[in-house]
Image: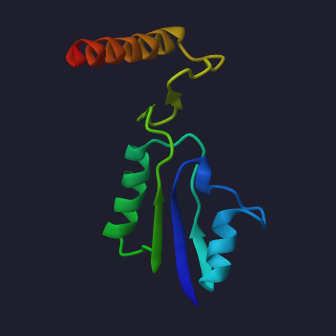
Amino acid sequence: MKTIGFFGDSFCAGREPESWCVLLADRLNAQITHWGEPGRSIWSIFFKFNQLNKANRLPDICVLCYTEPYRLYHTSLILSANTEPVEGVDPKIYEALEQYWICLLYTSDAADE
């Protein structure tokens, strides 16, 4: 049997029988070896993919899903536009995140003029 791996965010993390990942794997007659992880950024997706590639452990079929372009890479936090602060995390991180998005918006608007 072929193997299939989903590398991405929550869009490819659903393990319910009706999830598109399960339906696709069934259609391809493939066993799922990797699932997406909620809140992952494109960087963490590629880090995981590259680790498996270097170890020669990639599945036969690889599906890369990146549905949230506004996520920033962080090893342990989910940092997206409009992220709700997590209790116990320094609030300055979220203030910096908000300022980052404001700065990008401002510089993008200025570039359009």
Colour scheme employed for the rendering of this structure: rainbow
Report the residue that reaches farthest toward the bottom: 1
> As displayed, is residue 33 above or below residue 76?
below
Q: Position of residue 13 (x, y in %)?
A: 63, 55
In screen coordinates, is 19 left or right of 58?
right
Instruction: Give whichever of 111, 71 is nearer the camera.
Output: 111
Q: Is residue 48 above or below residue 94?
A: below
Seen at 57% across and 55% down, the residue is: 36
Which residue is pictured at 24% across the width and 18% down the height?
Answer: 112
- Residue 84 image point, x, y percent: 62, 20
**Corner quadrant of residue 30:** bottom right
Picture layout, residue 9 above or below residue 82: below
- Residue 62 place in picture, x, y as percent: 45, 70
Compared across the picture, whether 1 is left or right of 15 comes to: left
Say whether residue 67 is left or right of residue 43: right
Q: Quadrant of the N terminus?
A: bottom right
* Nearest the eye: 71 or 78: 71
Q: Quadrant of the C terminus?
A: top left
The image shows residue 104, relative to residue 54, as above or below, that is above
Circle count: 0
Residue at horizontal 50 percent and vertical 28 percent from the top: 80
User: In the current view of this chain or complex, which residue is farthest to the right?
Assistant: 17
Residue at 54%, 80% (x, y): give it. Answer: 3
